[in-house]
Image (tube, grey):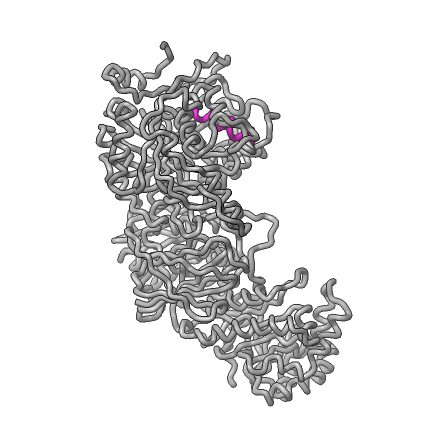
Amino acid sequence: MAIGVQSIPMRWAAGSLDIARRQKDKTFTPAMADVLRKWLDPSLLALVQGTPINCLVVSWSSGTAADAEQQTSLKPLLDKARQAGLDVVGLIDGPGDKTAAVAAARAAGLSAIAMKGNPPANAGIPVIAWGSSDQSLWSADAPVLAISDASWPGVSQANDPAGGPTNLPWVDSNGALIGMAQAMGAGKGVKSVWVAVDPPTTVKQTAENFLLAIADAQASGGRWVISLDDQLRADLAAKTAASAATLKRITDMLAFFEKNNATRAYGPMARLAVVSNFSDPMDRILGEQSLNLLPRTREPFRVIARSQALAASLDGLQGIFYVDRELPDAALRQKLIAFAEAGGTLFVRANWSNPEGTPMQLSSEEAYLLFSERSVGKGRLAVARQDELDPFFTCADIQNILSHRGDPMRLYNGPSMNCVCQVATDGRQGVIHMLNYARRAGGDPAVVYVKTPYAKASFVSPEIASPVPLQLAVQAAGGAELTVPKFAVYGAVQLES
Amino acid sequence: MKRNITRRECLAGAAMAAGCLLLPNVPTIARAAAPSTRPALPPARAGKVTIGRCKTYGPELVTTLATMFDQLGGLGGLVKGKTVAVKVNFIGVRSQRLGDAKMEDTFWSHPSMIGAVVHLLGEAGAKQVRVLEGPWSSAETLEEVMLSQNWRPEDILNAAPNVEFENTNYLGRGKKYSRFWVPGGGWVFPGYDLNHSYEDCDVFVSLAKLKEHALTGVTLSMKNIYGTTPITIYGGQAGIDEPAVRPQGGRGEVFHFARRAPSKSAPQQIDPNYSKDAGVRLPHIIAELNAARPAHLAIIEGINTATGAETNYGSRPQAAVSPGVIIAGTNTVATDGVAMAVMGFDPMAVRGKAPFTSADNMLQLGEEIGVGLRDPKKNEVIGVPIADALFDFAAVRTKILQQQRGGRAGGA
């Protein structure tokens, strides 16, 4: 099977390379090393048989003397995987002869390799770009981009519990990284974005932690490379009932997303687009943090790579945040200004030379805003007043300037939740993915507001047996509210016209 | 009785001659330099409080309020030709509802209530009505805050001629903050710097919600005035020397726990070693603010509200309830005293007794500083009798706790 959007990957940590990798961790014990040796046993592949997992990622080469032993010890596992119809991807990292490692992978019959940087010429095997979320990853010519510097999703454990502009808790999510990778990979044939993050070793993971990692990626159109923690790996090798139950919940969550995969063809339900190449380090910080914080202000968004913006459709948008200090070329600038002239609001940085339009007279109570506004045709050009922009206040001010009158959606309660809003191309169906980073149902049900007048709504979740119809309470001010059943990790509101 | 009156109060004197009793029963609002001595405070005067029954936010609301204001002596003499500032209550994180009940049905001033009050003020001849509040950690306009709750702000803006909103959490439309000195010198702070709106008005109305408070026991028309203090000066992220440009966070660091001082440009704490017990600080500060910026009219709406606390804490036994009452009066202490009685609480309770289990009695302090009298027996209480309007908040909590324990339901 070709590696691509249908690949549902699992990190199969086993053998000497993974032992060497983990030995850098102070919490790693000899017992854990034994477990990693046990996971070379082909019989353990029974754990994924009959589940949606169809692709294993194994450590293949780290440029050390242990490579040969690793590749030899993996052979029985690889043979069994091939017989079972599983793809196997070999992870190549570290220094060393990449050409030799690739050749060995080809000879061993691996489905693909995953590596950072450019593969050797004529690799003769599909290559997954596997690395940090930066230009080298995004510029890779690969069917899959795997982000290796992702976060472990959840409510932040940082010492400072203060949240963002809404005072909601900070949550760690990979939605921003996935959005950036998808935008930067658009037009390059990128079919899938993977999130390659292992569970933290410092705290015991519950089933809900793994489920959230899956949902956090899936909601944004990516996939988490399933990765088990040491305890679960040990318990599965020992065939405990509890570990089998946890694995079943993981695979059931994967099956849920496969069953409800029609939304993969949907686009963002958003009035705001964030445009950036995320290349300049400071632009990257502002852009990435904006993508992290906009969900906390409940402002849905699209991500458009600056390099793709000229060709991108701006239909349905009311606001564009042009993040980059580097000014657009003439054609793109003309397109962005035309957007504003037609009634949209274009947000730009302070170095936007010769700003179009005429300054708007704002009241003194708007003096605190980070942007000064200019009237351009039917719309506005909002120019940042200062070079450095606080991402918190930037997101708050953008939403404020666009006005809550046009909010596509709002969320009440669910302080630890994020929503990812999508709509079908014909606009007749929509979905609001709801992710609960607290990983347990709260005391109050979440209430969702949608502006678009849908006729029917239902709630689906792997946590309930069948869809629950939701009542759309039409609001006198327009739009409708829906009360969502409580859920621990993930649920989705499905909307139909 | 002789008393000091301001120029604005003089204008209302004519109305007194006409029989209007809705007069500013307030001490002088000192705006000049800080008093160098602590003058003796005039004793608090009796007020007039009325209770009205109102089950819904429909047409009966305006009718009920009109009757109540007439019972207090009529609005005309108080507001005709005047600028009226109405401080409403939009407390806490705006997205945190109690269950799926809307904010206006639990913790916030209801838009229909605000609109009805604005309408009646306009009908009584107010030249301008300004609706004021400092929403949590935000400089967004009140219009934007209302839109975020699916309200129609235009309904309030159009309820009377010349209606405005202003977010008073920061400088807003003002060029500078206005300083209000506490009569008698105060206990905690000698004065407070507030948004200009609280000075640039002839009449000040405290429009509150009938609620309990997790710390101060109750939050009514007195506590509503606590929200006049700008976060840019009194917030945890306030500027050190000068006010911050935009508000962020809450007032706990400065007011509750004295972990930091207000911006140095504002009056500083009288005694740096003053108690750091929030149960002492907050009631004293609330009383000071009520004396420094007294209200001419206090209105407490309890058509729909919530029990248990002032906002959704998540961990407390709380419920959305419908007492169906409105209380209005000529000063905040008297009005709060009657409201507490309607809630089933004793306004004469001391600290340690419900509802003041963790805090000093702010009504008692308000009385000491001359704002009004807290004992309903010492005020003129008209309209629906307290006994008929009674809605036992504590009983609701008891019932919730019993249900949580799986016991038999008690009765409220």
| Residue A126 to residue B279: above or below | below
Instruction: Tell me which residue sits at (55%, 67%) in the image.
Output: A211
Residue B189 or A414: which is nearer the viewer? A414
Instruction: Tell me which residue sits at (53%, 56%) in the image.
Output: A171
What is the x, y in percent for residue B163? 27, 36
Q: Residue furthest top?
A: B2
What is the x, y in percent for residue B118? 28, 35
Residue A426 seen anywhere in this rendered image of the structure = yes
Q: Quadrant of the C terminus of chain B?
A: top left
| Residue B80 to residue B230: above or below | above
Which span of residues is magenta-colored?
B279-292
Instruction: Tell me which residue sits at (61%, 88%) in the image.
Output: A109
The quarter holding residue B158 reads top left
**Is residue B291 shown in magenta?**
yes
Residue A402 or B82: which is nearer the viewer? B82
| Residue A67 to residue B69: above or below | below
Q: Is residue A214 left or right of residue B126?
A: right
What is the x, y in percent for residue B208? 38, 35
Q: Residue furthest front?
A: B408
**Is residue B271 shown in magenta?**
no
What is the x, y in percent for residue A487? 49, 61
Number of marks in picture: 0
Residue B225 seen anywhere in this rendered image of the structure = no
Residue A43 or B238: which is nearer the viewer? A43
Residue B331 or A143: which is nearer the viewer? B331
Q: Is residue B381 left or right of residue A435?
A: left
